[in-house]
């Protein structure tokens, strides 16, 4: 690596970690000011540190991308103001070549985000949720029942509340055979597929569910049950790793569109540092006697927040099958690239 590359990369790394520590400190201070009393009264100092480490892991994509945005703008504006970019250009180095250290650092951040999404973030999100649940203010004694789910081969879904391993029975079971065809039973023996206190619910002409028939017991021979199926608690899609989502997309056709929405989202978000370079570099490296630095910074931060909010909203549309998964997730990014990439390619 050449001297000028080490110089730029060194400034970028130092600035990046400075902004990262500042963002983390601000987040921790604000969160502790709101929840610190409950946390400190019920947990040790070590538990609180572990909680914020899990928070950092679950929000790593957001922290790293925002920090990289601030650090990139700071370094490029500083290089332009002190005429260092002009001096390097006079030596025959183009602006796009000057961005090589930034792209190297962006690639490292993306790699870290992929590792985190695959190995650390799923467990961190679950541990964070458990910690918050344990420190909630008890407004009522009513406990929220857990829900379990099993996807079946015919793309239907079995939802239940409890599984008794000794009697091998599911309790409070809903078999969602189709959007207009639902079976409910008090219990279901998974060996004989015999349900007790069974109600058949169908949707009428008024688009309302009504009880079509009832049975004290009924054998569901048409239920495509697999004896090797794993009965598990429903894990939110955002708490699943990339490999898990990919394998489940191939195994559970009934949830394919929802899974692909989250899979595309998890594959896309770690690449955001590259989009930051395409969008910010042309304006921060432009030399002028008077540059609206404040406006460039404000527009960049606002654009990042707007894109992040848009992606989260499009993820919901993809989950609910309002739009195809690839359109919902990749559409906003392609739209942003259509505006930023041509300007970047014109740099010399």
Image (cartoon, grey):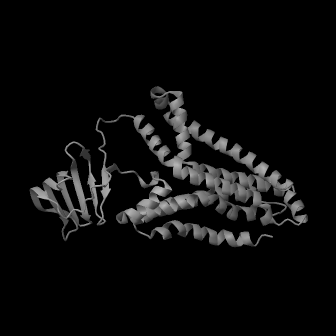
> Residue at 31% across / 49% down in the picture?
147
Q: How many marks?
A: 0
> Residue at 82% across / 60% down in the picture?
290
User: Residue 20 occupies which quadrant of the picture?
Assistant: top right
| Residue 256 on image: x %, y % | 40, 65
Q: Is residue 301 visible from the viewing direction of this image?
A: yes
Q: Is residue 205 left or right of residue 252?
A: left
Q: Closer to the camera, 86 or 181?
A: 181
Most extreme residue toward the front is 228
Q: Is residue 116 left or right of residue 296?
A: left
Q: Is residue 298 left or right of residue 305?
A: right
Q: Is residue 3 left or right of residue 150?
A: right
Quadrant in which the C terminus is drawn: bottom right
| Residue 164 on image: x %, y % | 23, 44
User: Residue 258 occupies which quadrant of the picture?
Assistant: bottom left
| Residue 14 on image: x %, y % | 75, 45
> Residue at 71% across / 51% down in the picture?
71
């Amino acid at each position: 690596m050449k001297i000028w590359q080490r110089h730029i990369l060194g400034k970028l790394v130092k600035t990046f970690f400075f902004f990262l520590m500042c963002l983390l400190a601000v987040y921790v201070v604000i969160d502790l000011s709101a929840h610190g009393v409950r946390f400190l009264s019920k947990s040790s100092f070590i538990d609180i540190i572990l909680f914020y480490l899990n928070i950092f892991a679950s929000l790593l994509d957001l922290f790293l991308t925002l920090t990289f945005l601030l650090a990139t703008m700071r370094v490029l504006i500083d290089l332009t103001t002190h005429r260092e970019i002009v001096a390097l250009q006079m030596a025959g180095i183009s602006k796009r070549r000057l961005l090589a250290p930034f792209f190297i650092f962006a690639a490292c951040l993306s790699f870290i985000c992929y590792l985190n999404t695959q190995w650390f973030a799923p467990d961190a999100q679950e541990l964070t949720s458990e910690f918050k649940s344990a420190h909630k203010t008890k407004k009522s004694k009513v406990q929220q029942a857990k829900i379990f789910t099993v996807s079946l081969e015919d793309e239907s879904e079995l939802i239940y509340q409890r599984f008794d391993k000794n009697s091998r029975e599911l309790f409070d079971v809903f078999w969602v055979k189709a959007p207009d065809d639902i079976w409910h039973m008090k219990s279901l023996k998974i060996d004989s597929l015999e349900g007790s206190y069974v109600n058949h619910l169908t949707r009428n002409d008024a688009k309302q569910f009504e009880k079509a028939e009832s049975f004290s017991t009924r054998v569901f021979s048409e239920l495509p049950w697999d004896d090797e199926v794993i009965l598990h608690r429903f894990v939110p899609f955002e708490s699943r790793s990339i490999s898990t989502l990919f394998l489940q997309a191939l195994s559970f056709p009934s949830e394919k569109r929802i899974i692909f929405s989250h899979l595309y989202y998890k594959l896309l978000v770690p690449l955001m540092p590259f989009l930051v370079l395409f969008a910010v570099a042309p304006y921060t490296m432009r030399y002028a006697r008077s540059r609206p630095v404040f406006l460039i910074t404000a527009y960049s931060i606002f654009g990042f927040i707007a894109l992040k909010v848009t992606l989260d909203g499009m993820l919901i549309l993809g989950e609910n099958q309002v739009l195809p998964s690839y359109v919902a997730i990749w559409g906003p990014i392609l739209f942003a690239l259509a505006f930023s990439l041509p300007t970047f390619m014109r740099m010399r």
